[in-house]
């Protein structure tokens, strides 16, 4: 693991060129560029229809009700009544925290088929440019892939660049749950890749799921590839601020509070995803036992102790990762705070040997993936710490896969 200069003078001087670029961008594009995200119109339309709907003469509950309240409502229905709601209001039910997980899967299949039909028409719409028709074709292919047998789509929203979440394993019966939170340039079209597959959320989650089963074959695990937030587009203004992270943190905590069962949950947050997890940390439910960040530009706090969580905080960074050169500070809303692998931050720093750059942490065969998997199944004795980190193993003796309730 590379040693890092954490002196204030070093960080400030290194930051000046980057901050100058960001301020120029703000001057030319304006702060309103960060606030141009539209509401998800298709989803909002489905929710509006739900709000005016009924079943057997009963008004449907407020879709913003807590997950426990919504869970009781769905439990009061017959299987036929639940399926009828999923087909009538697919986007609403498919994204409703509190709806039964299998029902969300079924609702999102309906929504995906509807979205695919829309894109199929757009492909042949003469009013669109050739680029627009090609985009429609790419989206149709993505929806077809998400509809493949055996895929479990927990959330789906086709609006804009799109949002999606997928589950690997049995979420209802899992003894341990892991959530992968990706970073910039994540949307429907980049959710899965054939080339460099382990740099995309699906590949990350699949690799982690396989590694967790290898680490503890008798532990029932589930891994969620969570791309259900609007990530920054490239390394521009959005990536330098916490706006997208604040929006994402609200959505992330809504998911975490609605997860079924009481299994311990581990968060695995990559790049800008670690900013999301940092902002969300203080609001995460107590069942979140671990927050592990890789390739982090910061968690918008000065130290792990300020995250407002009782979860263990882990960090890793490969020596060849370019993110080590970002300015680790926060000034006027720009930047994301202290370096999570620095000694002063207070995280448990893990070995990331062989991760190979910024996007290689979930590559099979690496120390980084094995360490993440050991955390995911609660096998803390198996983690490999960075040699210079003294707090990595502190307080871990006697821990088990049971975690906290």
Image (spheres, rainbow, N blue to C red):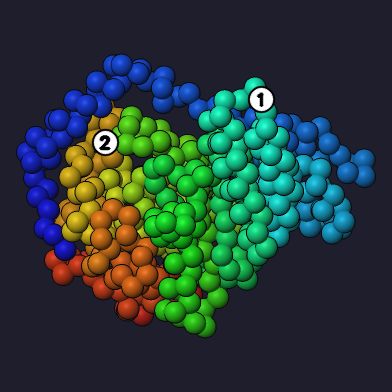
Task: Compare residues 312 and 186 and report the one nearer the observer.
Answer: 186
Say which of marks 2 and 1 sits in front: 1
Query: Residue 392 lies in what quarter of the image?
Result: bottom left
User: Residue at 35% across / 17% down in the picture?
Assistant: 30
- In the rendered structure, the answer to whether residue 287 lies left or right of residue 238 reads right
Above or below — where is 123 with respect to 286? above
User: Which dot marks residue 338?
Assistant: none
Task: Compare residues 42 and 114 and report the one nearer the observer.
Answer: 114
The quarter of the rendered structure image containing the N terminus is: bottom left
How much space separates mark 2 and mark 1, taking CA atoms?
A: 44 Å
Tag 2's secondary structure? Answer: loop
Residue 204 coordinates in the image, percent (x, y):
43, 60
User: Residue at 52% across / 78% down in the picture?
Assistant: 219
Q: Note whether residue 287 is visible.
A: no
Above or below — where is 127 with respect to 190? above
Label 1 crowd bin: few (<14), some (14–19), many (20+), radius 10 Å: few
Tag 1's secondary structure? Answer: loop
User: Residue at 23% across / 30% down in the picture?
Assistant: 331
List the residue tagged with mark 1: 126
Q: Note whether residue 121 is visible.
A: yes
User: Which dot marks residue 335?
Assistant: 2
Residue 104 coordinates in the image, percent (x, y):
69, 53
Counting residues from the start of the chain, the first of labels 2 and 1 encountered is 1
User: Residue at 33% across / 73% down in the picture?
Assistant: 365
- In the rendered structure, the answer to whether residue 385 lies left or right of residue 128 reads left
Above or below — where is 303 with respect to 289? above
Residue 349 coordinates in the image, percent (x, y):
24, 63
Label 2 crowd bin: few (<14), some (14–19), many (20+), radius 10 Å: many
Residue 173 coordinates in the image, percent (x, y):
62, 71
Query: Residue 239 lies in what quarter of the image?
Result: top left
- In the rendered structure, the answer to whether residue 88 lies left or right of residue 206 reads right
Marks counted in the figure total 2
């Amino acid at each position: 693991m590379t040693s890092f200069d954490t002196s204030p003078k070093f960080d400030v001087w290194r930051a000046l060129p980057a901050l100058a670029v960001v301020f120029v961008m703000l001057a030319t594009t304006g702060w309103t560029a960060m606030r141009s995200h539209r509401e998800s119109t298709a989803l909002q339309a489905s929710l509006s229809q739900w709000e005016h709907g009924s079943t057997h003469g009963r008004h449907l509950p407020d879709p913003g009700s807590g997950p426990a309240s919504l869970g009781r409502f769905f439990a009061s229905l017959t299987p036929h009544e639940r399926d009828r709601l999923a087909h009538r209001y697919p986007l609403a039910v498919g994204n409703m925290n509190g709806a039964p997980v299998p029902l969300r899967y079924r609702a999102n299949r309906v929504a995906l088929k509807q979205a695919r039909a829309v894109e199929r028409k757009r492909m042949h719409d003469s009013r669109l440019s050739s680029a627009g028709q090609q985009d429609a074709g790419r989206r149709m292919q993505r929806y077809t892939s998400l509809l493949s047998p055996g895929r479990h789509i927990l959330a789906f929203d086709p609006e804009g660049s799109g949002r999606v979440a997928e589950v690997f394993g049995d979420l209802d019966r899992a003894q341990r749950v892991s959530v992968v939170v990706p970073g910039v340039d994540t949307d429907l079209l980049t959710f899965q890749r054939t080339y460099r597959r382990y740099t995309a959320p699906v590949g990350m989650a699949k690799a982690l799921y396989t590694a967790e089963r290898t680490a503890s074959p008798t532990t029932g695990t589930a891994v969620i590839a969570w791309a259900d937030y609007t990530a920054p587009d490239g390394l521009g203004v959005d990536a330098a601020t916490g706006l997208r992270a604040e929006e994402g943190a609200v959505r992330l905590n809504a998911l975490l509070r609605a997860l079924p069962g009481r299994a311990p949950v581990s968060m695995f947050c990559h790049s800008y995803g670690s900013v999301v997890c940092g902002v969300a940390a203080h609001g995460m439910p107590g069942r979140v036992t671990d927050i592990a960040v890789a390739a982090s530009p910061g968690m918008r706090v000065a130290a792990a102790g300020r995250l407002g969580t009782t979860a263990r905080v882990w960090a890793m960074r490969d020596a060849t990762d370019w993110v080590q050169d970002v300015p680790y500070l926060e000034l006027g809303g720009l930047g994301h705070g202290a370096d999570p692998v620095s000694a002063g931050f207070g995280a448990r720093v893990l070995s990331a040997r062989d991760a190979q750059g910024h996007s290689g942490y979930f590559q099979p065969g690496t120390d980084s993936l094995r360490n993440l998997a050991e955390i995911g199944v609660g096998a803390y004795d198996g983690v490999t710490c960075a040699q210079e980190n003294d707090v990595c193993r502190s307080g871990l003796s006697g821990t088990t896969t049971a975690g906290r309730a």
